[in-house]
Image (cartoon, rainbow, N blue to C red):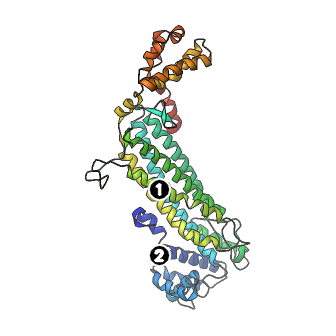
Amino acid sequence: MIPRYSRPDMVAIWSPETKFRIWYEIEAHACDAMADLGVIPRENADAVWKAKDVEFDVARIDEIEAVTKHDVIAFLTHLAEHVGSDEARFVHQGMTSSDVLDTCFNVQLTRAADILITDIEGLLAALKRRAIEHKNTIRIGRSHGIHAEPTTMGLTFARFYAEMDRNLSRMRDARAEIATGAISGAVGTFANIDPQVEEHVCDKLGLVPEPISTQVIPRDRHAAFFATLGVIASSIENISIEIRHMQRTEVLEGAEFFSMGQKGSSAMPHKKNPVLTENLTGLARMVRAAVIPAMENVALWHERDISHSSVERMIGPDATITLDFALARLTGVIDKMLIFPENMIENMNKFPGLVMSQRVLLALTQAGVSREDAYAMVQRNALKVWEHRTDFKEELLADSDVTAALSPEEIEEKFDLGYHTKHVDTIFARVFGE
């Protein structure tokens, strides 16, 4: 992923230096376990730890790989240069390359998940704060982009909080599912390595042993992991789209913070564009782009092939780095987001009183009017407001059919905004707890 959309802690997980350090720990812990079982001499296992403070030379490993055309062999050759060829002769005993590659990949994904979980927790805190702040800030709810009925800005933030809270659970589940390791040897039968070695290595790396592997860890786990990233990205886009719509000039109920010295357009100095949420919409697409390849990686030939390998070398870093950046960016947007309550009321009153049509419809039916007649009575007055920008309440009061069923006082009562916010506390309790 390009530096523009990267944060250092997540990038570090995917660096060659980190990868080779994890490979080393897998091999060293495996040697310890084999020494404990009496499979290899203890002194050879201890000798491997001589490299525990070594900074592995990435360029040197690449140089060896240019000859061997095999990355794990290149690393093992470089490790022997530090440990000594005789001392290192039992390294990788009974193991296959995928034992190292797959276990390492899952360690990296688990560490990435930890960062993403922290990111989501930060976003949840921002959403909760803004929800409470605007719990009773009235705005118009929209369906199909058209005015529907009143809601509150707090409820908008609260529903995004609830969605992200579900994503937090999904991310924790995905972390648990991906946190497996396999040190089971060629085709996963443990023919040349004891299962206790796998148990020891996994315990040291914070993983659990894969119950049954072939020569690779089953890729349905990875498909579920990347699918979870895709769902979270879609939620980011969901929130971003709402903010972008709110910032439209004709709406302007909310907006991204515009800092001193910021420029919106190279041509039009007046512009304040929702560039951050537009950026987030694009980044969400890139995270979701990893989902289908991860799904296609599930089907491998027999006990293994490497069709998944090139895919994972790209989507592992790219998807996690991008999502980490996007979550942090969205948190900043929510934290600093500008809210314009006056514009919300002004927008709702562009067609005065029109958004109360359902209350009038229900009142008429409760007064004994058939639903079909009540709908026709309300709609004909509503259409006058659409066409002539008149006042809906005044139109109703001038309609003899309506006033035959409802008194002026009953009609007036149907235009109380508080009616639409009476259960906000109940919803908040459901979302945030009592």
Q: 137 or 143, which is in the foreground?
A: 143
Distance of mark 1 from mark 2, alpha carbons?
A: 30 Å
Classify mark 2: helix, strand or loop.
helix
| Image location of residue 431, percent across then percent down | 52, 38
**Residue 359 on image: x %, y %:** 52, 21
Q: Which mark is residue 129?
A: none
31 or 173: which is nearer to us?
173
* Residue 344, quarter of picture: top left
Viewer-nearest of discs 1 and 2: 1
Q: Is residue 43 above or below residue 355?
A: below
Residue drawn at the location 72% of the way across and 75% of the way down:
187
Q: Residues within 10 Å of mark 1 (few under 14, many from 20)?
A: some
Q: Using a 10 Å C-alpha cutoff, classify the residue at mark 2 as few (fewer than 14 neighbours), some (14 to 19) or many (20 or more).
A: some
Identify the disc placed on residue 282. Answer: 1
Query: Of helix, strand and loop, which one carries label 1?
Result: helix
Q: Residue 302: x, y in percent?
A: 74, 72
Toward the front, the furthest residue is: 387
Question: Which residue is painted at 53% across and 35% down in the image?
Answer: 430
Q: Amino acid at mark 2?
A: Glu
Q: Is 142 located above or below residue 370 in the figure?
A: below
Residue furthest to the bottom: 86
Q: Earlier in the sequence, mark 1 or mark 2?
A: 2
Q: Amino acid at mark 1?
A: Gly
Q: Is residue 313 above or below residue 369?
A: below
Residue at image location 45% in from the left, 43% down from the top: 242
What residue is disc 2 on? 17
In the picture, measured across the screen, residue 280 lies left or right of residue 28, that is: left
Q: Is residue 294 visible?
A: yes
Left or right side of 274 for 317: right
Taking the image as shown, residue 270 lies to the left or right of residue 67, namely left
